[in-house]
Image (cartoon, grey):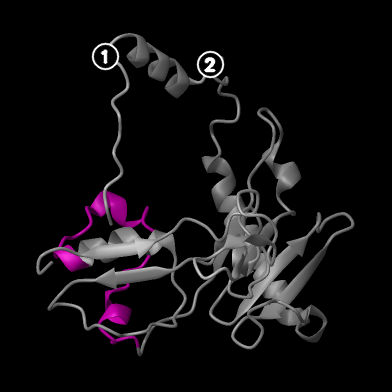
Amino acid sequence: LDNTVVIFMSDNGMTHNGSGKIGSIIGKNTNGKQMHVYNAGMRGTKGTADEGGVRVPFFIRWDNKIKAGHDVGTLAGHIDLLPTLGSLAGAKLPKKLVNQIEGRSLLPLITGEDANWKDRYFFTHQGRWKTGADPDQFKWQSFAVRNQEYRLVARGNVEKNGKLELFHIPSDPGQKTDIAADKPELVKAMRTAYDKWWENTRPLMVNENVPMSKTKPYHVWYHQQDKTDGIPVWTPPEL
């Protein structure tokens, strides 16, 4: 462990379909007490643009290098992982990649030197539509903009009959009180930032006309292996 960085994180908030609705009973523990679906009081689950759909844990450990027990409350995201690992390893990004990496190294936060950390926006968009559909038709729905203090969330299609809701996450992590009407300038600024983000992201959606596979490749390979070498029996390790 003295020369290995260990990171624990996940890719989304609590799953909805696999676990049921928040608060529903999923069984009993060894003491016979009922266990309920839990999402830390946050609104939303996987597949939503709410805090509970995208907020994830992030633990990092490097013995004798990173001080244990240090809790960081500064907003960060998955795009920060590559530059962070680069910093920890003492590596420099190739010049041709500098402008392609939007994340920041979290090393100053990890070491506690975060005095000059500049706030920024993070964007969430539930980009799901049928193959061949126009992505621009889904621009103004199922999205969110987040900075250190606030989350702006779209309810329905904002350009039609939907609306934008604003929440102050530090004081309202469960997103119970919409304060959009109290801060119209902030709502406008965050919406403008999202519009700019979409304009920059839209040209990267270059696979809309790629034909879908007529088969499920992993299923095909599984059956091929089953008929030849066979599928090995897997014994779960003891943790």
* Of the two numbered discs 1 and 2 in the rendering, the one whose residue sits closer to the viewer: 1
Element type at mark 2: loop
For this rendering, which residue is in front, 97 or 126? 126
Mark 1 belongs to which amino acid? Asp
Q: Which residue is mark 1?
A: 229
- In percent of width and height, residue 101 lies at 36, 56
For this rendering, which residue is in front, 122 or 15? 15
* Residue at the extreme right: 161
Quarter-of-image position of residue 21: bottom right
User: Who's the residue at 44% across and 83% down the image?
Assistant: 73
Predominant secondary structure, magenta span: loop
- In the rendered structure, the answer to whether residue 158 lies left or right of residue 84 reads right
Mark 2 belongs to which amino acid? Thr
Q: Residues within 10 Å of mark 2 (few under 14, many from 20)?
A: few
Which numbered disc covers residue 215? 2
* Residue at the extreme top: 227
Quarter-of-image position of residue 72: bottom left
Q: Which residues are magenta?
A: 88-114
User: Who's the residue at 75% across and 84% down the image?
Assistant: 183
Q: Is residue 99 magenta?
A: yes
